[in-house]
Image (spheres, helix red, strand yellow):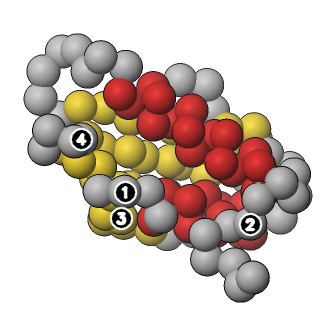
Amino acid sequence: MAPFHTSGDPVTLFRRLRDVVAAMPRTHIVTATDDYLHAVCRTRVGFRDDLEFRWCPSEGVAHVTSASRVGLFDCGVNRRRVERVRRMLEAINSGRASAPGDAV
């Protein structure tokens, strides 16, 4: 999957990414540092998938991977999950939405 291209303060942007992932249903953040995020997402039928972001401020991108732990084919669930995160983050960064952790 294509990395997330961003501009602006990398600390704020990665914090927003962490907030978006934390607000996703059936998702548990396992590890969150200044440049790495690992979450486990459960599908509706109970399978566990790994969602990982590696922040590279020098490149202005966050590399992303989302993969099923079991099986060879996931019916596109992981791609849709990443694209949903991408859309939500773009909306927050453009001011069309507030971050899940932002005060209203």
Crowd around label 1: few <14 · some 14–19 · many ≥20 (10 Å)? few
* Amino acid tagged 2: Ser
Q: Position of residue 65 (x, y in %)?
A: 43, 35
Question: At numbered mark 3, what does the secondary structure look like: helix, strand or loop?
Answer: strand
Q: Splitting the image into 4 quarters, where does residue 97 fall? A: bottom right
Q: Position of residue 60 (x, y in %)?
A: 77, 45
* Amino acid tagged 1: Pro
Of the two numbered discs 1 and 4 on the same chain, state the one appearing first in sequence: 1
Query: Marks 1 and 4, how far apart in space?
Result: 9 Å
Q: Position of residue 90 (x, y in %)?
A: 75, 45
Nearest the viewer among 89 and 25 is 25
Residue 58 visible somewhere in the drawing: no
Check disc 2 and report the residue beneath it.
98
Q: Nearer the viewer, mark 3 or mark 1?
A: 1
Crowd around label 3: few <14 · some 14–19 · many ≥20 (10 Å)? some
**Where 22 falls versus 40 (above or below)?**
below
Q: Are marks 2 and 1 in contact (CB under 8 Å)?
A: no
Check disc 3 and report the residue beneath it.
29
Query: Marks 2 and 1, how far apart in space?
Result: 17 Å
Instruction: Say left or right for 3 vs 82.
Output: right
Name the residue at 14% across, 38% down.
Answer: 45
Check disc 1 and report the residue beneath it.
25
Check disc 4 and report the residue beneath it.
43
Query: Marks 2 and 3, how far apart in space?
Result: 20 Å
**Where 3 falls versus 7 (above or below)?**
above
* Amino acid tagged 3: Ile
Question: At numbered mark 2, what does the secondary structure look like: helix, strand or loop?
Answer: loop
Crowd around label 4: few <14 · some 14–19 · many ≥20 (10 Å)? some
